[in-house]
Image: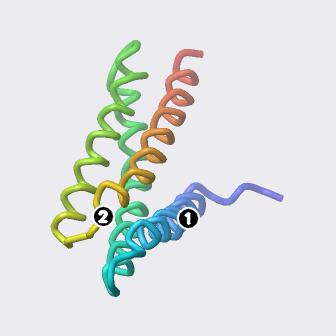
Amino acid sequence: MTDPPAKGRSLIHMGAGFALMGSWAVFANRYHPMPNPIIAGLVQGTLSATITLVMKIALEAMVQRFSGRFGLFLPPLVAALISASVLSVVHMIVRTPEVLATIAVPVTVATTYASVYTYALWARGRS
């Protein structure tokens, strides 16, 4: 069996991000009246899907742009700060009741992904 093309993998990752992080947002806001949990879930799912795609592209560009150890540490830091900022602002705009609980897991997952993916790109570039 062959691997799906890169575009297919991106769509799979985006769909998984939407489903998993959107579900988390619903769960994090479950004690608030409807439709608050559903709105939080749809917003978070959409943001997670979008951030997944944009982050991958941005990390690849940053690792190539920065030299030495900056290429290892700066891209995940930038990705984490932008992710946390965008998620916070958008959830405040849509009045998500539990902003910190809603974004805690997505920011942690995004930062972990950014760190691991950056290391893989950085290490490949060094060999």
Question: Which mark is drawn over residue 16?
Answer: 1
Q: Quadrant of the N terminus?
A: bottom right
- Near mark 2 (Cα within 10 A), the count class, few <14, some 14-19 or many ≥20, is some
Which kind of residue does numbered mark 1 sit on? Ala
Q: Is residue 15 above or below residue 86?
A: below
Q: Nearer the viewer, mark 2 or mark 1?
A: 2
Q: Residue furthest top?
A: 68
Q: Residue at x 56, y 21 (%)?
A: 123
- Near mark 1 (Cα within 10 A), the count class, few <14, some 14-19 or many ≥20, is some
| Whole-percent x, y for residue 64 in the image | 39, 27
Q: Quadrant of the C terminus?
A: top right
The residue singled out by tag 2 in the image is 98
Q: Residue furthest right?
A: 1
Q: Secondary structure at mark 1?
A: helix
Q: Residue at x 20, y 72 (%)?
A: 94
Q: Secondary structure at mark 2?
A: loop
| Whole-percent x, y for residue 89 in the image | 18, 58
Q: Residue at x 44, y 46 (%)?
A: 110
Q: Is residue 80 above or below residue 122?
A: below
Q: Is residue 68 above or below residue 77?
A: above
Which picture quadrant has residue 79? top left
Q: Residue at x 37, y 55 (%)?
A: 51
